[in-house]
Amino acid sequence: MNQNSLFHNPQEHHKVRDGSFLHIETFLNHQESAIYFEMLKNDISWQQEKMKMYGKELFFPRLTAWYADEGKTYSFSGLTLKPKPWINSLLELKKRVEVKTNAKFNSVLLNRYRDGQDSISWHQDDEKDLGKDPVIASLNLGATRKFQLRHLQSKEKIDIALKHGSLLVMFGKLNQYWQHQVPKTKKAVGERINLTFRHIN
Ligand SMILES: [Mn+2]
């Protein structure tokens, strides 16, 4: 893939220590974003998954869903998700993200943050099924939440406000050298839906 062809607008492309990302603030316009937010809220089969820790079952502080090509399971935190078959709204969004990024995706992980107490803690998208240097495209709908990147060695931090209709594309090396999280907030925030399009081997 020729990544240079993606960067029509150099202001959207951020080079950082050991990697780069693309941040497009208005990937979808307000009207499209509002329509997809409502559709996904209603049409996605949302689950609150549990993980076992020290013999106790803990709920993840967010709702999740996994849609993918047949047979593409997803494993994280000791959990394996079987894919739900694609629905039209997800296929439309996948197509648009593929055109923008010049990459191909066969799966999407959806996370729904119901309020400021929902979150995801520091991690890397480094499951081996993603292969080396994966492109991960993250589409954001609903409330703006703070997304943080933290370099594993230097601990340098980057905060990005992910807004309604924005797209953040993380290129392979970034996930090797940086962790990311969406921290809890005490601010009164509405719901946010995040879609991360991935290619699973
Ligand atoms: Mn992640």
Image (cartoon, rainbow, N blue to C red):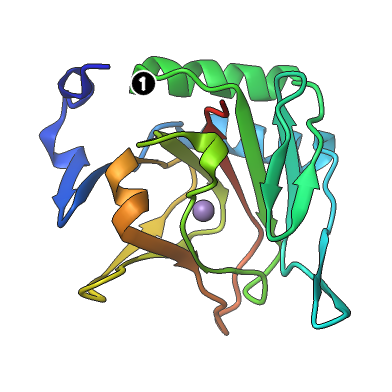
**49 relative to 72 in the view: left or right:** right
Does residue 43 appear in the picture of this structure? yes
Where's the N terminus, which quadrant?
Answer: top left
**169 relative to 120 in the view: left or right:** left
- The residue depicted at 85 percent of the width and 40 percent of the height is 45
**x and y, in percent, of residue 51 in the image:** 80, 67
- The answer to whether residue 15 is above or below residue 197 is below
Secondary structure beneath disc 1?
helix
Where's the C terminus, which quadrant?
Answer: top right
- The residue depicted at 66 percent of the width and 25 percent of the height is 90
**x and y, in percent, of residue 140 in the image:** 51, 45
Please name the amino acid that badge 1 sits on: Lys
**79 relative to 146 in the view: left or right:** right
- The answer to whether residue 64 is above or below residue 42 is below
Q: Residues within 10 Å of mark 1 (few under 14, many from 20)?
A: some
Does residue 24 appear in the picture of this structure? no
- The answer to whether residue 22 is above or below residue 88 is below
**x and y, in percent, of residue 186 in the image:** 57, 84
Q: Which sits in the foreground, 168 or 73?
A: 73
Q: Which residue is mark 1?
A: 100
